Amino acid sequence: MQIRIKRPWECKESEVTEPTLYCNRRQFIKTGSLALLGSSLLASGMSMAEQNIITTKTAPLPGIKKTTYKLDDKLTTYSDATTYNNFYEFGTDKKSPALNATAFKTAPWRVSISGECAKTGRYNLEDILKPHSLEERIYRFRCVEAWSMVVPWVGFSLADLLKRFEPNSKAKYVEFITLHDPEQMPGQRRKVLDWPYTEGLRIDEAMHPLSMLVVGMYGNELPNQNGAPLRLIIPWKYGFKSIKSIVGIRFSETMPTSSWMKAGPSEYGFYANVNPEVDHPRWTQKRERRLGGFFKQDTLKFNGYAEEVASLYTGMNLKKFF
Ligand SMILES: Nc1nc2c(c(=O)[nH]1)N[C@H]1C(S)=C(S)[C@@H](COP(=O)(O)O)O[C@H]1N2
Ligand SMILES: [Mo]
């Protein structure tokens, strides 16, 4: 039997669902009054810095095409999506990324392309982005910790970018790597995860039209805490696959081992498809709570994208390949 040590990122369900801050924030959003904002936030014991993270917005992105990916679900508020984050490079509390990433430098930014492709090299972010027109897509997003949100992401198809580097026939997988910079990322000064954060996809998953490279949300540039300047969003997989602040993309013949697989191989698999039928070893995955909501709702297989993606996994035992 394996003895389990509780890791810092294992937050209790109670912390996920009903933090007091949360309730107060909801109150503000409903009233929309600045006077009330001040009083309700101060009443909740929020610092000035915490108040500022709610009122600061990033610059708008011009020329965004409207979405072909829409949902009937109510959008998560900008405030909720930008102040309740997982970005362990900036701390393991849900509020830490918004508080600790304010001075994070996202320009100049370079992305290195390596491995099994014709056009390896280090590219400036501007050159990476230039040929792609921006599109807004409203996706469901579900964290492995059983909370979820609905966000209008701004970006483009990951496939459109990957094809430009001309992957060869040995490119069976794609690995993504986050910046490693403990000076800027205080969370990396502790070995919470094996830094830098890495994630991986099978090449057909990466090339699927739903897979998205993201540079913005809610019509504006990506806030630092949400993974500026460039992140992945893979809507049918648990949130941890959607790696933030990407500086490396590597095509490989063998399956890459992600940071989460190294941290807990029995809990975090390579596939990480949202699946209500396969419980996490320590909690159920059958239900989820929307940020801003109080009641749980059923989790959908492949997070509701089964029609689009189930064929990627035909014949696979999804209990084994979790
Ligand atoms: N580099 C990096 N990427 C990351 C994480 C992280 O800690 N570091 N957390 C992941 C997890 S667990 C989730 S749920 C999502 C959260 O994205 P959001 O904060 O934009 O909602 O980011 C994912 N990407
Ligand atoms: Mo997550």
Image: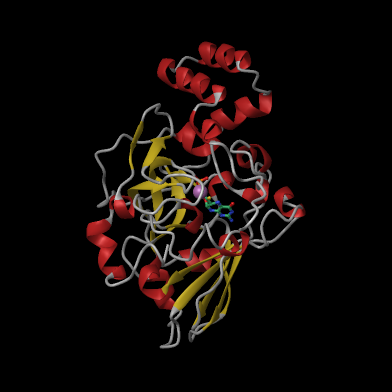
Q: Residue at x 30, y 69 (%)?
A: 312
Judge left or right: residue 53 versus residue 133.
Answer: right
Judge left or right: residue 264 versus residue 309.
Answer: right
Q: Residue furthest front?
A: 1
Q: Position of residue 269 (x, y in %)?
A: 49, 63
Q: Residue at x 72, y 54 (%)?
A: 188
Q: Residue furthest left?
A: 307
Q: Quadrant of the C terminus?
A: bottom left
Q: Is residue 104 visible?
A: no
Q: In this orientation, which residue lies closer to the viewer: 236 or 110?
A: 236
Q: How many marks?
A: 0
Q: In this orientation, which residue lies closer to the viewer: 278 or 87?
A: 278
Q: Is residue 212 visible?
A: yes
Q: Position of residue 206 (x, y in %)?
A: 40, 69
Q: Residue at x 27, y 71 (%)?
A: 314
Q: Position of residue 219 (x, y in %)?
A: 41, 43
| Color scheme of the displayed model | secondary structure
Q: From this view, report whether residue 118 is shown above or below residue 270.
A: below
Q: Quadrant of residue 53?
A: top right
Judge left or right: residue 42 versus residue 210.
Answer: right
Q: Quadrant of the N terminus?
A: bottom right
Q: From this view, report whether residue 151 is shown above or below residue 45.
A: below
Judge left or right: residue 312 versus residue 129.
Answer: left
Q: In this orientation, which residue lies closer to the viewer: 195 or 263?
A: 263
Q: From this view, report whether residue 116 is shown above or below residue 299.
A: below
